[in-house]
Amino acid sequence: MIRIDLGSSAAAAGGLSLLIVLGGAQPAGTRPGGPSAPVSAPVGDGSAAPRFDVRTLRPGTAPGLLFTTPQPSGPPTDGSGAQAPARSPAQAQALAQAQAHPRAPAAKGPHGPEILDEHGRPVWFHPVPDGQFATDLRVQRYRGRDVLTWWQGTVTTRGGGIGTGYIADENYRVIATVRGTTAPADLHEFRITSRGTALVTGYRTVPADLSSLGGSKDGKVEDSVVEEIDIATGRTLLSWSALAHVSPADSDAPVFMYGEQPFDYFHVNSVSEDTGGDLLISGRHLSTVFKVDRRTGRIIWRLGGRRTSFPLGAGVRFSWQHDATSAGRGTVKVFDNGANQLLEGYESRVAWIRVDPARGTTRLVRQLTHPAHVSSTHEGSAQDLPNGNTSVSWGAAGRVSEFSRRGALLFDATLPHGWTSYRLYRQQWKGRPADPPTVGVRDGSVHAVWNGATGVARWRILAGDARDDLRPYAQAGWNGLDTAVRPPSRAGTAPRYLKAEALDASGRVLGASAVTANAEAS
């Protein structure tokens, strides 16, 4: 057991990162033998992809698609109503509190990374198996080209994750993977830098004497870890331990709430680069954003919380935040939850905060709130868009939005009841699946499916009674990765064979299915 003096300020004094090595093997970084493919559930015909209900869509939204990871929330149950494994952090936390709180009906259904257009139509869906979860789907740059990245793995009852970061090309083929070394890669962050490295978060349990905080002498602390890993080699370039720099006594989370569970006093939920190359690290359970020297691990300053480095100007104070990122030199943007699972109902917002270390001042530059006064107890993100708009996921509230530079609501959508999305990104992406389209007949319509294809404007269906004698049969505009094409009103007998061709806006064929027998033909 490692004894930690929780009452001292030594841990917060800065200095090099402390590496506490625990027994047992830790996951390696990128596998030298090549990346491993993420485990996926069958996509099927694509009709099971989670749907968003678009409530507001006005002119002025930024170009691009929406990148989300819809997930069920609420205590999970199986088909008989009995307790089942958690499928998301929200479910994991709900499961941990199920003994103390009434159980609400659990959301269920296929879940995983999903790309949509602004009308809520699925473009790409990667369902993950029950017992796994995915987060942080987005477009990033790696080795000079756009790639698709996400985290996938299992979740813990404390809202953390144990998994792998995946990097896929425009064909949706995984070209690299990243795993933590000091601690397993966690679900909260998978950020690629211009150096060809990945910033990841992680958690590890450390035995600790918590008696000075009213806990057990033989207690445990959940240490938050930030790592920078070279993607090509898997080598760890930086390993930062919160426990080496921040005392658990600074936490806003009371130790008694954790019972026999490890005391998650810090709860890292984002790490990003500031304009000078140092790191911004968000500690949710301290209501603090830390600026950290990337070379030494020393804390340069703290924004917010009990030991803030600067007085907080009017409107600056935030709590239980997510997604702290740089918004230009001297400005930090945070998704300010303002609430947690035990303090529900407080309005959440996005806040831009100017920090002036030389003068020792902070100032609220601007903020965004939802017209419906949305409160998000956990999860959430905010993205500055190239045209000046801001894209927001309201996390646990099950809502995603886009606001103009002046704060007007341009886009607003709700997720299926009982679902959340940890983060939301609006980005441009060109996807060309390695697999060709498929075609089939269901409920009297021909269904053309091409999971992940972008740039498809229309589908043309060819049909006939012989494989080598197909003629134009029907057309329809693209309407999601699974597009239903109604047969002609005077089609007569259903054709025996079908083929689907994906056309771009100019009528050029982007891809075609194999000639497929019509299962509903007599």
Image (cartoon, rainbow, N blue to C red):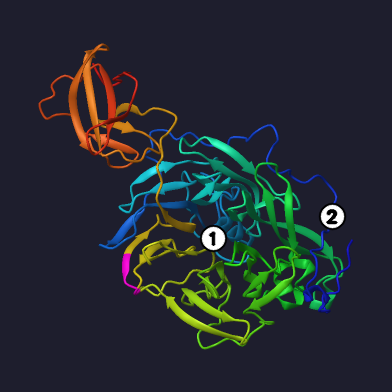
Q: Magenta stretch containing residue 407, yes or no?
A: yes
Q: Tell me which corner region of the image, top left, top right, bottom left or bottom right, holds residue 405.
A: bottom left
Q: Position of residue 194 (x, y in %)?
A: 58, 53
Which quarter shows the C terminus? top left
In the picture provided, is 183 more to the left or to the right than 498? right
Q: Magenta stretch containing residue 352, yes or no?
A: no
Identity, as a three-letter code, of the amino acid under mark 1: Arg
Please state which of the two labelled residues, at mark 2 or mark 1, is closer to the viewer. Answer: 2
Q: Position of residue 277 (x, y in %)?
A: 62, 64
Q: Position of residue 261 (x, y in %)?
A: 74, 62
Q: Position of residue 118 (x, y in %)?
A: 33, 54
Q: How far apart in space, not on screen, are marks 2 and 1 (Cα)?
A: 39 Å
- At label 1, counting other C-alpha atoms closer than 10 Å, the crowd grade (few under 14, some 14-19, many 20 or more) is some
In the picture provided, is 206 more to the left or to the right than 428? right
The answer to whether 9 is drawn above or below residue 145 in the figure is: below
Magenta-highlighted residues: 406-410
Q: Nearer the viewer, residue 291 or 114?
A: 291
Where does label 2 land, which residue?
21
Q: Please tell me which of labels 2 and 1 falls first in the chain.
A: 2
Where does label 1 land, which residue?
103
Identity, as a three-letter code, of the amino acid under mark 2: Val
- At label 2, counting other C-alpha atoms closer than 10 Å, the crowd grade (few under 14, some 14-19, many 20 or more) is few
Q: Nearer the viewer, residue 165 or 76?
A: 165
